[in-house]
Image (cartoon, rainbow, N blue to C red):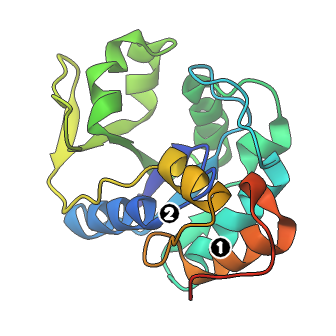
Amino acid sequence: MKKIGIMGGTFNPPHVGHLLMANEVLQALDLDEVRFMPNAIPPHKEEPNGATGEQRLHMTALAIEDHAKFKLEPYEIQKGGKSYSFETLQVLKEREPDCDFYFIIGGDMVDSLHTWYRIEDLLKLVHFVGVDRPGTEGKSELPVIHVAAPIIDVSSTLLRRRLKNNQSVRYLLPQKVEHYIREEGLYGTTTATSSH
């Protein structure tokens, strides 16, 4: 069985926190690869502002292209509509029955895992991997594999705010992603300056 990590999120934009988290789990659990899967409209958030699904997919591809074991999973963006992990994992499991899937989530999501859509059925399809984050309990009655990792407390919200205010995002975003954001004028950026 191939061991495949799945890292879902809006990736609006993808940042070094996502990359670090994925790499730590990849090493800790000896996974064959980690797939980054931007979601179309996550059920627990409003529609992401500032970047389309295609742009978020492209930024994610740029962020991971230097890592041989990081892959892009475009399924949810291509499908469109609301993204429920249960339905997505059913499709992935049918498509690749010889794979063991590990769903990577932050500590904040571990806390609310019991509220996920059809969580009992989802647990039959996937192993959950919780990466501890500052300010979260990261505790659940449900079976979760815990991975301790150095965590950078950086969020996409913070980065969007900094980009809009033309403040530096150096070392927080992959350079290629920042260039793309500025080229496309995303999140209220102006194309003129870069913090590199």
Relative horizontal placement of residue 3, taking residue 55 as reference (left or right): left
Name which residue lies at 43% across and 55% down.
Answer: 5
The circle on residue 177 is: 1
Other-residue count near label 1 (Cα within 10 Å), few / some / many at <14 / 14–19 / ≥20: many
Q: Tell me where residue 192 appears, x and y as whole percent.
A: 79, 80
* Front residue of 82 and 102: 82
Q: Say which residue label 2 marks.
A: 15
Residue 130: image x %, image y %?
Answer: 26, 41
Residue at the spot 14% in from the left edge and 54% down from the top edge: 148
Sequence order check, earlier mark of 1 and 2: 2
Check whether the beta carbons of the residues at disc 1 and disc 2 lie within 8 A of each other.
yes
Label 1: element kind: helix
- Few, some or many residues within 10 Å of mark 2 (<14, 14–19, 20+): many
Which of the 4 image quadrants contains residue 24? bottom left
Residue name at image x 82 percent, y 47 percent: 52
User: Could you tell me residue 30's position as x and y percent?
Assistant: 27, 68
Image quadrant occupied by the N terminus:
bottom left
Q: Is residue 186 left or right of residue 104?
A: right
Quick check: 2 above or below 43? below
Q: Which mark is residue 40?
A: none
Q: Amino acid at mark 1?
A: Val
